[in-house]
Structures are given as structure tokens and as C-alpha cells.
Image: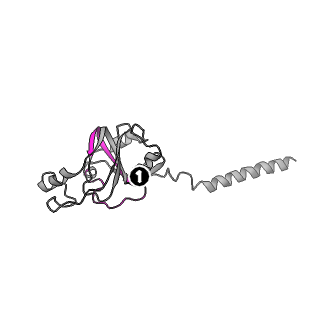
Amino acid sequence: MADFHLNRVLGRWAALVCSMMLAMPLIGCEDDPPPKGFEKIKVVDTTYTLELAANDQKRTKGLGERTELPDKGGMLFVFKRAERRQFLMRDCFMDIDIIFLDANGTITAFHHMPKEPPRAEDEGEVGDWDPRKPANRRYESRLKRYSSRGAAQFVIEIAGGELERLKERGLKVGQKIELDVARLKALAR
């Protein structure tokens, strides 16, 4: 009788161990570290792998000159300090949705940013953003500005259309997005 009970317990234990081993490849898929230069951020119920823009050059270019984003991709802008910000669609050839976050990761504003008409002949060259050139000033003066409405230190840009889906699932101003703010702030240049 004792052998029967022991075999039953061992059988259950073996079944549990086998089921755990089969499930292990599935565990942590969402927790896999992002590639170097990227950050994984969960917004409502969706995890995005966002390219980091933590220096002036990357922040200025942003998603400019791109025509598409990878599925659940985008960009996370990281600034040295929180302040009121305005973004525009400089040489961006696709619609983008933008979410502004304060120094703690709380949403201050979000917007859908449709692509702008391409540069006219008298508005400079694509990719040239030198503000000292009159043609570039003409181009930038006609672009719509999208405001953070408050001090923002982080900005998320994702594919156009994602914002509506996220709002349907509960995204709202004042909501906190989990970020490793201390580590991200240390990256800002």
C-alpha cells in the first residue's frame, strides 16, 4: 500500500515537472530583454519595443524619413529634464501617434499626428534641418505643432492608429506608464 501511495505521489510530481518544462519556453517571452538601443514599454495591454532617442541628434531626427514602423515598434524620446514640449512631423512619411509623459511616467497629453504634405521646392531638402537656412524655416513654419500641455520628459511615438485602439482599452491623460525612469534619465544627453 505504501508503494502504491509513493508511486502515485511520484507520478504526480513527474507530471508537474514535465508540464513546467514544456511551459518554460513560453515563460518570459514578453520579458526578454530588448535589443541594445531599445526599450520595452507596456501601454495599457500592449508591449512596444521602442527605439531610444536619448541625444540631440536622435531626438531631432526622430522618425523622420521613415515610411513604416515594425509591428509594435516606435520610438521613446528621453530628455534631460521635464519641460513643456512641442513635436512636429518633420520629413515624416507616415502617420504617428504620440504620448507625452512627465518625469514620473504619467501621461500629460496624446495626439494623432497625420503625415504632412511633402516639402515644396522652396522648402529645402529632405533630411536637412538646419534652422539657419531660410528654406528650412519656411518648411517648419507650416508644420503643425503637438503640445505636451505640461512638463514632459519622455515621449512615445508609435504607429498611427494605435492611439485609438489604446484609448478604447482605457488609455487616458493622468495614467501612469511604467518606466525605469532613473535608468532612462541617466541615458539622456
Residue 92 appears in the picture as rendered: yes
Question: Label 1 belongs to which residue?
Answer: 162
Q: Residue at the location (31% across, 39% down)?
A: 152
Q: Is residue 75 magenta?
A: yes
Above or below residue 186? Residue 23 is: below
The answer to if 62 sits in the magenta stretch is yes
Left or right relative to 89: residue 177: right
Q: Position of residue 14 (x, y in %)?
A: 72, 53
Residue 181 x %, y %: 38, 40
Residue 140: percent from left, percent from top: 19, 52
Residue 42 seen: no
Residue 89 x %, y %: 27, 53
Left or right of residue 166, residue 18 in this image: right
Q: Quadrant of residue 189?
A: top left
Q: Is residue 16 above or below residue 173?
A: below
Amino acid marked by disc 1: Glu
Q: Secondary structure at mark 1?
A: helix
Relative depth, front residue between 187 and 51 = 51
Give the image quarter of residue 73: bottom left
| Stretch of the chain drawn in magenta | 60-86
Q: At x 38% / y 42%, what residue is drawn?
A: 183
Residue for point 41% across, 49% down: 164
Does residue 109 appear left or right of residue 167 in this picture?
left
